Image: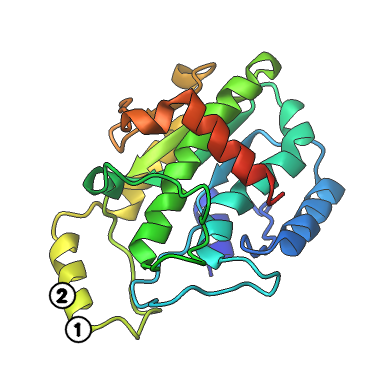
Amino acid sequence: VALADIKKFSGSEDVQLILVDMSLKSSIAEFVKEVKSKYDTIDVLIHNAAVFDLAQKETIQTEEGYESIWMTNHVGPVLLTTLLIELIKKSDDPRVLTVSSKGLLAMPRLKIDLEDPEFKHRKFTVTKAYYQAKRAQIMYTYWLAKEYAECGITANSIRVPAVKVDISPHPNISSFMKWIYTQKSKKAIEPSKMAKTYTYLATSPEVKGITGKYFDEHNQEVKPNKYTYDWTSINNVMKLTKKYL
């Protein structure tokens, strides 16, 4: 359906759909193999895939033995970027966008647990797992911007607020959580409006060359907490992340 909609609204048949499971390194490797067989350059890479099921009460292990949220929301995007970096370098204006969450404002003390990011030895909550990965994505963005500055690759992150989404695919959500979502939706923005920020950062000449920034839904730069842009912390998180690649 999404593919048909994109073709319809873009007026172009030159749209490809390639499926990938971002929680699995093997799936990402197969995806990259297919992409490389079809394209020799990537202009924009947007890491929008994420899982956040409020009904989840326990960790879910992937078939490769890793915690699914940490892999899908953080490690997967890092691995995908790493495997595609040579194609990204070939672009005249290469851009990488990661996606984080405004919800982090409610968890200012949350840090990446360097000893147990997968909740093997601590109490799991889906919110902590999700926001830990989203914090890590911002930190990765700063690292990526610095690491590839000389190659001309720009890396920026988007702070996404509450967006109206269809929760029907999650029938196990409790009535209480559905009520909370209904209340939040009253102030949530439409997906089409949020998409304008994605488009702006992906294509606008106004942000060409701008890198290592964190933008809100109004296309304005915002700052995360001090821990998130502390370089000792960033390097520690990346050292941990690279163990998974």
In front of the other: 1 or 139: 139
What amino acid is labelled 1 in the image? Ser
Up/down of 140 relative to 173, above or below: above
Up/down of 222 relative to 83, above or below: above
Question: Is residue 210 shown left or right of residue 85?
Answer: left
Looking at the picture, how far across and down is residue 109, in whole percent?
29, 43
**Spatial separation of the CA atoms under disc 1 and disc 2:** 6 Å
Is residue 155 visible in the rendered image? The answer is: no
Up/down of 153 relative to 47, above or below: above
Which residue has dot 2 on it?
Answer: 179
Which residue has dot 1 on it?
Answer: 175
**Number of other residues with Cα within 10 Å of mark 2, as a class: few under 14, some 14 to 19, many 20 or more:** few
Q: Quadrant of residue 171?
A: bottom left
What amino acid is labelled 2 in the image? Trp
Badge 1 element = helix
Q: Which residue is drawn at 62% across and 53% down?
A: 76
